[in-house]
Image (spheres, rainbow, N blue to C red):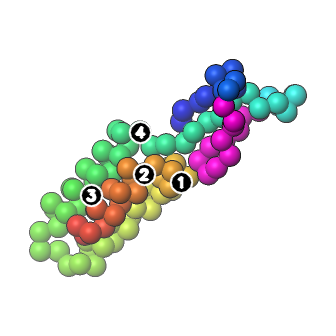
Amino acid sequence: VRIKPKVRMHLEVPVHKDGVWNLQNESTKEMTAQAFLRLDDEAIQSFENRIRQVLMSSGSATFTKIANKWNTSLIGLMTYFREAVINTQEVLDLLVKCENKI
């Protein structure tokens, strides 16, 4: 999460799109900052290593077993990171690449 305070947005218009949360003061309801959701490089690398491990250990396993491991890894990623996955282009590219490998 990258937080950008309102003070640094003096010449910019606040962004209103998916993956951007407006943070506001509870008592005044004034927007004080915006939070931009994104996966960090460590989490991306961890997912890529997990898929690499699935492929390396597959050996002569059936496609069903490999597909089940892929699905489990994908569900784990989406459950933990949810909205941040959709708003990180590198992860979307990685998902396509890994799915083609599977």
Q: What residue did someone put label 3 on?
A: 51
* Label 4 with label 3: CB-CB less than 8 Å: no
Label 4 close to label 1 by CB (< 8 Å): no
- Prevailing SS of the magenta stretch: loop
Amino acid type shown at disc 3: Ile
Q: Secondary structure at mark 4?
A: loop
Residue under circle 2? 89
- For mark 2, does the 10 Å Cα neighbourhood hold few (<14), some (14 to 19), or many (20 or more) residues? few
Q: Which marked residue is nearer to the observer: mark 2 or mark 1?
A: 2
Check disc 4 and report the residue beneath it. Answer: 40
Q: CA separation, marks 2 and 1? A: 14 Å
Say left or right for 19 vs 22.
left
Q: Range of the magenta residues?
A: 12-24
Spatial separation of the CA atoms under disc 4 and disc 3:
17 Å
Along the viewing direction, whichever of 61 and 37 lies nearer the viewer:
37
What's the CA distance linking mark 4 and mark 1? 14 Å
Q: Amino acid at mark 1?
A: Arg
Outermost residue, front side = 11
Q: Is residue 88 above or below residue 35?
A: below
Residue drawn at 82 percent across, 30 percent down? 30
**Above or below 57: residue 63:** below
Residue 11: x percent and y percent?
68, 26
Near mark 4 (Cα within 10 A), the count class, few <14, some 14-19 or many ≥20, is few
